[in-house]
Image (cartoon, rainbow, N blue to C red):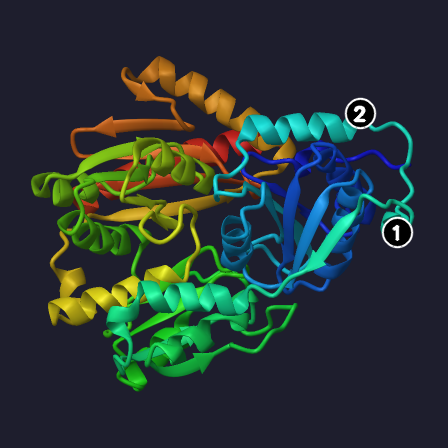
C-alpha cells in the first residue's frame, strides 16, 4: 500500500495529478470515509480522461458503507450542485481539477444547499483517510450490499428550465454573443441554454476535449486572444469564456477588452443593490479598492473575506449578501444560486445590457479603475508556506497595521499589496494596486524582489 500524499487535501478541495498522487485507491478511501455518514450524495465529474475512473472509485467507496448515491455522470459543476439542491440531497461531490491542466484531477465537496466543506472539515477528512492502515479492496459492493442505493440521474433539463425561468425577461433577446467553453464541461450545457434564450450564438471551443487543446482549461488574458478577436470581428455584444469545470466566467466587452473580476463584479453589484433591499456585498481581500469607492456611495455595505470560493459562498449565506465576488471571477448571486455556478454571470450581464440600453463597454468605462495586477511566483507546495511565514515575520517587523486575515496585506495611503499562498497550486501570489503608475511600479519592484529572494533561499 502506497502512502497517501497529504498535500492533495487543500484548503478548498482535493487536487492532485492522476496516477502520481491521486488515483482510484485514494478516491475509493475518500468515498469510504464520507460514506460512513450514511447520508445521500450526488456525484458527478467533468470531462477529464480520468474522470470516469475516479468517479466510479469514489462511488464504490460511498456505497461500500451503504450510502445512497445519485450519479449525474459527466456534467458541469453548476449542474451537480443544482442537482443536490433540487433533489434535497445531503452532499454534492464533483470530480474535477477546475482550471488546472488535463493531467490533474480532484474533488469539490459541498453540502446539499451549496455550502462548501470548509478547510477544517477537509483536514478532518484527510486525517480519517490517512488513518486507514490496510488497503481496502475496490470491489463492486453494490452486488453484495442490499442497503446500497445508486441511481443514474440526468439533471440537464431541470437545470436548463430553472435558468430559463429565472432569466425569462431576456428570452428572444437576439443579442450576439461569442461563447468560448474551452473544450470543457460547459460544452454540455452553455451553448444550448444561450440558444434557448434567443441569443445569436457563435461558438468557440465548444467541442469536448479532455486535453483542452483549444486554449487550455483556464481563461486568462493570454489564452483568450482568439475570443477577443472574434468578438470584435463579428461585432458581438460581448463574449464569455468558461474555465474547465464551469465555476468561473470571464467576460469580454464589445470592444474586445478582457474584463477583470473587479469590473464585472462592480457592474453586477450596481444592478443588484439597486433592485434589492439587501445591500451587502462580499468581496475578497484581493479585490480592488474600486468596490468601496464605487459602491459605498450607492448604499452598499462591503464585507471583505479571505480569498477562496469557499469563503465567498459561506459568507454570502452567513451575511444574507446579495452578491459575492472573488477577483478571479468566482461569483455568487444569491437570487439564483447559493453557490458559484458561472452560467448566471453572462445571463445577468445580458439582462443589464437590455434593461439599461447601454453597451457593455459603456458600463465598463463608467468605472474608475486603478493600476492593478496579480503576479504569480512558482513555489513548491512543500516550500510555499515556509516562504510566506518568513515574509510575514519580516513585514510585521517593518510595518504597523498589517492585515493577516489571508496572507499579508499592507494598506498604504496610495495603494496596497497582498502576498498570499495559492491554496490550489504550487504558487505564491502578489496582488498590487495603486492610485497611479508611479506608485504601482514602486510597489511591484519592491515586493517582487522580496518574494523572489525568499523563494530562492528555500530552493
Classify 421 as above or below 219.
above
Tell whether 427 sits left or right of 249.
right
Residue 304 position in % (x across, y down): 30, 33
Q: Secondary structure at mark 1?
A: loop
Tell whether 61 sits left or right of 345.
right
176 and 173: which is toward the camera = 173
Residue 371 position in % (x across, y down): 23, 48
Total label count?
2
Circle 2 Cα neighbour tier, 10 Å, few/some/many (<14 / 14–19 / ≥20): few
Classify 6 as above or below 102.
above
Residue 437 position in % (x across, y down): 20, 47
Q: Which mark is residue 140?
A: 1
Q: Nearer the viewer, mark 2 or mark 1?
A: 1
Q: Residue at x 85, y 50 (%)?
A: 142
Circle 1 Cα neighbour tier, 10 Å, few/some/many (<14 / 14–19 / ≥20): some
199 and 285: which is toward the camera = 199
Q: Is residue 182 visible?
A: no
Tell whether 395 sits left or right of 218.
left
Q: Is residue 57 visible?
A: yes
Q: Secondary structure at mark 2?
A: helix
Alpha carbon separation for disc pair 2 and 1: 23 Å
List the residue tagged with mark 2: 131
* Quadrant occupied by the C terminus: top right
Residue 121 picture quarter: top right
Which numbered disc, 2 or 1, marks the residue that appears first in the sequence?
2
Residue 27 position in % (x across, y down): 76, 44
Residue 29 picture quarter: top right
Q: Residue at x 21, y 56 (%)?
A: 267
Amino acid at each position: 500500500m502506497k502512502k497517501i500524499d497529504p498535500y492533495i487535501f487543500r484548503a478548498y478541495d482535493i487536487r492532485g495529478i492522476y496516477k502520481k498522487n491521486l488515483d482510484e485507491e485514494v478516491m475509493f478511501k475518500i468515498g469510504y470515509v464520507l460514506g460512513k455518514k450514511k447520508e445521500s450524495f450526488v456525484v458527478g465529474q467533468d470531462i477529464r480522461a480520468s474522470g470516469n475512473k475516479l468517479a466510479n472509485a469514489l462511488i464504490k467507496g460511498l456505497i461500500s458503507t451503504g450510502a445512497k448515491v445519485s450519479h449525474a455522470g459527466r456534467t458541469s459543476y453548476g449542474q451537480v450542485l443544482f442537482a443536490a439542491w433540487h433533489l434535497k440531497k445531503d452532499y454534492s461531490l464533483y470530480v474535477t481539477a477546475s482550471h488546472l491542466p488535463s493531467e490533474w484531477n480532484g474533488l469539490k465537496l459541498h453540502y446539499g444547499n451549496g455550502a462548501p466543506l470548509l478547510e477544517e472539515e477537509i483536514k478532518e477528512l484527510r486525517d480519517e483517510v490517512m488513518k486507514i492502515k490496510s488497503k481496502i479492496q475496490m470491489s463492486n459492493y453494490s452486488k453484495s450490499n442490499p442497503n446500497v442505493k445508486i441511481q443514474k440521474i440526468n439533471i440537464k433539463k431541470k437545470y436548463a428550465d430553472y435558468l430559463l425561468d429565472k432569466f425569462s425577461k431576456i428570452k428572444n433577446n437576439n443579442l450576439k454573443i461569442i461563447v468560448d467553453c474551452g473544450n470543457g464541461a460547459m460544452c454540455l450545457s452553455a451553448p444550448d441554454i444561450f440558444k434557448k434564450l434567443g441569443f445569436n450564438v457563435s461558438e468557440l471551443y465548444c467541442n469536448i476535449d479532455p486535453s483542452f487543446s483549444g486554449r487550455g482549461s483556464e481563461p486568462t488574458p493570454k489564452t483568450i486572444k482568439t475570443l477577443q478577436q472574434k468578438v470584435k470581428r463579428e461585432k458581438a455584444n460581448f463574449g464569455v469564456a468558461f474555465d474547465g469545470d464551469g465555476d468561473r466566467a470571464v467576460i469580454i466587452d464589445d470592444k474586445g477588452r478582457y474584463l477583470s473580476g473587479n469590473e464585472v463584479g462592480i457592474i453586477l453589484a450596481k444592478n443588484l443593490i439597486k433592485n434589492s433591499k439587501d445591500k451587502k456585498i462580499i468581496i475578497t481581500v484581493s479585490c480592488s479598492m474600486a468596490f468601496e469607492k464605487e459602491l459605498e456611495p450607492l448604499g452598499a455595505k462591503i464585507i471583505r473575506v479571505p480569498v477562496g470560493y469557499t469563503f465567498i459562498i459561506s459568507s454570502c449565506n452567513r451575511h444574507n449578501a446579495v452578491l459575492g465576488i472573488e477577483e478571479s471571477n468566482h461569483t455568487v448571486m444569491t437570487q439564483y444560486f447559493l453557490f458559484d455556478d458561472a452560467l448566471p454571470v453572462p445571463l445577468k450581464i445580458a439582462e443589464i445590457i437590455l434593461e439599461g440600453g447601454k453597451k457593455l463597454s459603456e458600463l465598463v468605462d463608467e468605472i474608475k479603475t486603478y493600476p492593478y495586477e496579480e503576479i504569480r511566483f512558482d513555489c513548491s507546495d512543500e516550500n510555499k508556506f515556509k516562504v510566506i511565514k518568513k515574509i510575514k515575520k519580516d513585514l510585521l517587523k517593518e510595518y504597523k497595521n498589517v492585515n493577516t486575515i489571508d496572507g499579508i496585506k499592507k494598506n498604504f495611503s496610495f495603494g496596497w499589496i497582498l502576498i498570499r499562498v495559492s491554496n490550489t497550486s504550487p504558487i505564491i501570489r502578489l496582488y498590487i494596486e495603486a492610485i497611479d503608475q508611479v506608485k504601482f511600479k514602486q510597489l511591484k519592484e519592491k515586493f517582487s524582489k522580496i518574494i523572489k529572494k525568499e523563494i530562492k533561499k528555500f530552493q
